[in-house]
Amino acid sequence: MESTKISIFCPATIANLSCGFDVLGMALEGIGDRMNVSLTQEKGVQITRITGGDLPMEAEKNVAGVAALALLDAAHYQGGVAIEIEKNILPGSGIGSSAASAAGAVWAINKLLGDPFTPLQLVGFASLGEALASGSPHADNVAPALYGGITLIRSYDPLDIAKVHCPPLLHAALLHPQIELKTSDSRSILKRTISLEKGIRQWGNVGGLITGLFTEDYGLISRSLEDRIIEPLRSLLIPGFDDLRQAALKAGALGFGISGSGPSVFALTTGPEVALNTEKSLINCYQSLGIPFKTYTSAINHRGVRLWNYQTDSVK
Amino acid sequence: MESTKISIFCPATIANLSCGFDVLGMALEGIGDRMNVSLTQEKGVQITRITGGDLPMEAEKNVAGVAALALLDAAHYQGGVAIEIEKNILPGSGIGSSAASAAGAVWAINKLLGDPFTPLQLVGFASLGEALASGSPHADNVAPALYGGITLIRSYDPLDIAKVHCPPLLHAALLHPQIELKTSDSRSILKRTISLEKGIRQWGNVGGLITGLFTEDYGLISRSLEDRIIEPLRSLLIPGFDDLRQAALKAGALGFGISGSGPSVFALTTGPEVALNTEKSLINCYQSLGIPFKTYTSAINHRGVRLWNYQTDSVK
């Protein structure tokens, strides 16, 4: 018999994009995990290797494992899968580390099984992995990881996802302050009610951002990258946030905000050069704080999780 | 010397479009006022004739007058204007009656003065007229009346307006229950705070509607025409609202909601035939209630206020 091993790239993602709390997300080209996935005769999910992160090996406690189990269960698959994870996206960084693992696992298994599920269904399975990581099955990282580009979650119940046009010049610069900030803590700082006035401003900005993306109006995109609801609370947990924003905007970035629930922050730019300038400014700004950090620049990933290679071995 | 009189069409408009409270609006092709405007040597604004509505003739108490005065003041114009208004949009109907007058006045005067102001500035002047009618300078009717098509107010402070793509098949059916419902009353029924959860749903829907409009995805448009914040409160003031919704959706409409602050209700459809079917269903549904009503169907107006004719007379 034959055994097929699939090797994939799983992109990092920026959720929220300032105004689009819980609904918008964007996939990155330059940062991502690598996973190897193969079908096994043994039932269940075995996580056989994890490098680059101290994560649980038991399938039921691992986001990739939980997502994979949900898919296998829905597929009534009699065998199982073996998963190797090479983490490059640091867990807890706020750029979709758990989402990359969950999205990668379901994308690869779906591929190996002959694509029985739609991308929308894959987001559903992957969200169950996300629920393990953060306590709620949010999809604003797994959706862009699977669809690529910029995605909108119109509704969670029922799950309804649309792809938003992504202008070709768009790039991102990111800074990851290496402080611990759990998604569940970042959520508990939020207030359960907002003023109608702030709500109107937020849906005006979501509308403006999406209109700007479709019409490639970078000025409108820039003006719409504003969040008066979540950011004022969450930014309190990120040292130097206001200075970083000023540095990014001074370097020519279109906008600046918190990536997902943080602690990473992101800036969007027109083109790679402004992204590199912005990265430099973020570095200059943060060096004096004494907090270890990493920075990245990246183009936008338009395809989502993608194949690196197939390996088919004869098994005796 | 010469005196130029300009005759214009001022479209009715549907504000909010369900999810887009205070930010979205759409102009209609089939319903609108007519106005005649001419420059005068005498300073100030004279409203010389109003037909079709019992509205104040004093400029300072008339929405068109207030808007016109704001523009003339900003232009430092030494003369004045004379305005005749032929109302076809019933005041208090919820389809932008006051906005049509305010938008028409500023559009015509701007034309007569040689276009010194941008459309954005015209919206600002017209909003001051709207403030007289409703107590707040909202722009979600005047913006589509001036820009045409579907407009988004990203922000009120500073005023920031974007045009959203409008798929060619889109049509509207409307029913106007002839009950009195003041904009100020419709606003006072609203709550000042909303749950974050409902906010997320609303900006997801605004994002979905705009994405659906740009991609001409009528299914997405239909699913996004939802409002769980304003409509549940305001619909209490409109007799038969739930039955009308069911009638519209059964007739094949994409969605159904309150036009602006009501009492008119609207349905969006793909094409004129479904709009006519929807109108019939709305009529059938409402006939038993014993409330007088009017109905309309309309294509979308893509140009906003427009010229009917110029008349230039020699004045002795």
Image: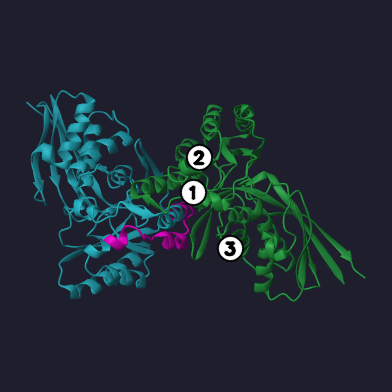
Chain colours: A cyan, B green
Q: Residue at x 15, y 34 (%)?
A: A38
Give the SS element for disc 3.
helix
Residue A55 lies, in percent from the top left, at 10, 47
Identify the magenta region. A209-233
Using the image, name the chain to which the residue with label 1 belongs: B
Is A297 in front, or is B287?
A: B287
Question: Hey, what amino acid is under mark 3?
Answer: Leu
Give the SS element for disc 1.
loop
Question: Hey, what amino acid is under mark 1?
Answer: Ile
The alpha-carbon separation of the residues under discs 1 and 3 comes to 30 Å
Mark 1 vs mark 3: in front: 1
Same chain assignment for discs 1 and 2: yes
Residue B223 lies, in percent from the top left, at 45, 37
Is A126 in front, or is B95?
A: B95
Can residue B202 be seen at all in this image of the molecule?
yes
Tag of residue B108: none
Residue denoted by label 2: B236
- Characterize the local packing of mark 3: few (<14), some (14-19) or many (20 or more) Cα atoms within 10 angstroms: some
Of pointers 1 and 2, the one earlier in the residue sequence: 1
Tag of residue B120: 3
Residue denoted by label 1: B189
Q: Residue at x 15, y 23 (%)?
A: A78
Mark 3 vs mark 2: in front: 2
Q: Are marks 1 and 2 in contact (CB under 8 Å)?
A: yes
